Amino acid sequence: MKKVIMYGSPMCGDCVEAKKVLEEEQIRYGYVDVTAGMAHLKKFLNLRDNRPEFDAVKAEGKIGIPCFVVDDKDLYIMLPEDLDVLR
């Protein structure tokens, strides 16, 4: 079973929808609410500021959530089209 961590916020409509899809598809995941406190925000910003996958997102002035880290290495911004990568 893959380890899936989702970074998001309940204030983000895309994040709320992504959580709904994961639950409907019965995909097990951990959740880090980046708006729940400074420690969570710092964890996300460290990821965002050090991964090239976020370069285009940052260039567009976007935050980059929801994002998913799979098995501590693969990163997806938004839900991947093929949910099997999260299973």
Image (spheres, helix red, strand yellow):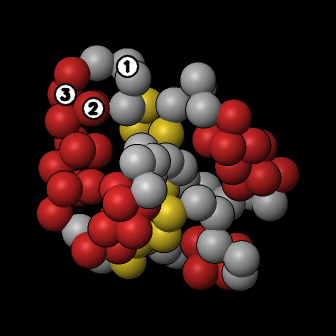
* Label 1 close to label 3 by CB (< 8 Å): no
Looking at the rendered structure, the kind of residue marked 2 is His
What's the mark number on residue 40? Answer: 2
Looking at the rendered structure, the kind of residue marked 3 is Ala
Please, what secondary structure does the residue beneath circle 3 have? helix
Residue 5 shows in the view: no
Whole-number angstrom distance, CA of label 2 to CA of label 3? 4 Å
Quick one: label 2, few (<14), some, or many (20+) residues within 10 Å?
A: some
Residue at the front extreme of this rendering:
60
The residue singled out by tag 1 in the image is 36
* Label 1 close to label 2 by CB (< 8 Å): yes
The image quarter containing residue 50 is bottom left
Residue at the right extreme of this rendering:
24
Relative depth, front residue between 69 and 46: 46
Taking the spot 58% from the left edge, 23% from the top edge, the residue there is 11
Quick one: label 3, few (<14), some, or many (20+) residues within 10 Å?
A: few
Taking the spot 39% from the left edge, 68% from the top edge, the residue there is 56
Please, what secondary structure does the residue beneath circle 2 have? helix
* Label 2 close to label 3 by CB (< 8 Å): yes
Residue 21 shows in the view: yes
The residue singled out by tag 3 in the image is 39
Looking at the rendered structure, the kind of residue marked 1 is Ala
| Residue 54 vertical position relative to residue 29 in the rendered view, above or below | below
The image quarter containing residue 73 is bottom left
| Residue 38 vertical position relative to residue 61 in the rendered view, above or below | above
In this image, 77 relative to 39: left or right? Answer: right
